[in-house]
Image (cartoon, rainbow, N blue to C red):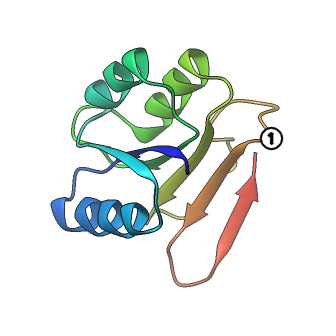
Amino acid sequence: MGELLVVEDDAAIGGVLTISLQRQGHEVVLTTSGADALAAADIRAFDLALIDRGLPDMDGLDVCRGLRVKQSGCVLVMLTGRGPGRKSPCGQGNSNCLLVWSGRRAWRSVA
């Protein structure tokens, strides 16, 4: 199946995502910081990255932008509890980026 990167500093959420994706047959690399995620992207190609917006060392938007430079073909999905904003999380014109807000109402935007 796919090579996936999960960037999540909350151990419970990261664990659930990793186990669920592995059960579906995906190879999963779990990182808990933006710096570790960008380092992993230097040594391994990913088909999809699930990125938490609120990381301890950097904003998930910066991780998204860094991954876009390193691996332009990787689909980026940003997970956030924050409300929807006006800016594209991954830069302008990227059709393979999705922002998912897990707030009170469902909201999705393809950047």
Query: Image quadrant of residue 55?
Result: top left
> Residue 108 at x, y = what percent?
69, 65
- Quarter of the figure that contains the C terminus: top right
Task: Please count the marks in the image.
Answer: 1
At a point 54% along the width and 16% down the height, the residue shown is 70
Query: Image quadrant of residue 30?
Result: top left
Q: Report the residue that reaches farthest toward the bottom.
A: 104
Res. 85 in view: no
At a point 62% along the width and 55% down the height, the residue shown is 99
At a point 27% along the width and 59% down the height, the residue shown is 14
Hey, what amino acid is under mark 1? Ser
Which residue is at the front of the view, 19 or 108?
19
Q: Which residue is mark 1?
A: 95
- Secondary structure beneath label 1: loop
> Residue 9 at x, y = what percent?
23, 50
> Residue 4 at x, y = what percent?
46, 45
Is 9 located above or below residue 44 in the figure? below
